[in-house]
Image (cartoon, rainbow, N blue to C red):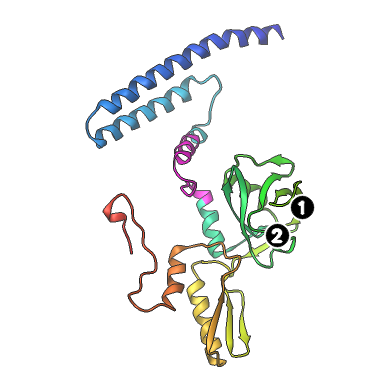
Amino acid sequence: TMLCRNILHARRPATAVLMVVLVAWLAGQASAVEERGTSRQQFLESIKILGAVYERVYYNYVDEVDPYELLESGISGMMEYLDEHSQYLPPVHYDDLMMSTEGEFGGLGITINIRDHYPTVVSPIEGTPAFLMGVQGGDKIIEIEGETTHDFTSNEAVKLLRGEPGTAVNIAIEREGFDKPIPLTIVRDIIKVESVPYAFMIDDIGYVRIQNFARSTADELSGAIDDLRNAGARGILLDLRWNPGGLLDAACAVSEMFLDQGDLIVYTKGRLRNQNRS
């Protein structure tokens, strides 16, 4: 115990000096960047500072750090500087995103994003375990298996919520109008990504449910509409309730089926001209 205490006391002054030196060095480098000319030069100087900080932390921090985790932490810091819709997706998380738009997985059947520091349900997928348990859009998932989710990323939440079909996960949700959190135990199931799960006739009106916008949406919808036309439908009702969104190209392809040629559906405008698109 005395040895540990002595080591701790010995570490603190050195750590404080290191922090002061690093902060002073960074301040000087930042000032130097501001004084240098073009934005290209500022960019290159900034990259040098970033690399130098990474190197010093990696080789000098009191505990050994994982280089990849350190890199991802730096990237996460950059993303926090931007708006909440800007995210970095490592390969495994990108694969998860693609699976959610064109595959199947074991999970609860909810789409989430981060709002007010907590994973928040955008929408439950109709017919899934979460939907059948009464989970609603706007519900904040404040605990997963007794662990607080404050400042979780959406990827961290998804990792804990997905799992083998038939296994249970315990969550607590905070819902507007309720004074106390609502505890739920939900059994995971196979979540099949079926964009147009059903279509049928209501008298002479065709009804089509679009559950999300995935790569197959336009083809599925086109086939459903052909069937309804052959059945004598004089109009089509598209049901987009609880649809959390999905791929922009898929939503555009659906819109093109109903709008006149030449009508503007959506446009993007970026800082650079080559990022503009209509």
Circle count: 2
Residue 141 is situated, as x and y percent measured from the top left of the image, at 67, 48
Residue 36 is situated, as x and y percent measured from the top left of the image, at 24, 28
Vertically, is 205 above or below 15? below
In the image, 191: left or right of 250?
Answer: right
Callout 1 crowding tier (Cα within 10 Å): few <14, some 14–19, many ≥20? some
Q: Earlier in the sequence, mark 1 or mark 2?
A: 2
Amino acid identity at mark 2: Ala
Mark 1, residue position: 184
Q: Residue at the location (27% across, 54% down)? A: 273
Mark 2, residue position: 130
Location of the C terminus (image quadrant): bottom left
Residue that lies at the very extreme toward the front in this rendered image: 177
Residue 193 sits in quarter: bottom right
Circle 2 SS class: helix
Amino acid identity at mark 1: Leu
Residue 22 is situated, as x and y percent measured from the top left of the image, at 43, 18
In the image, 39: left or right of 177?
Answer: left
Please report the bounds of the magenta region as a residue range: 71-93
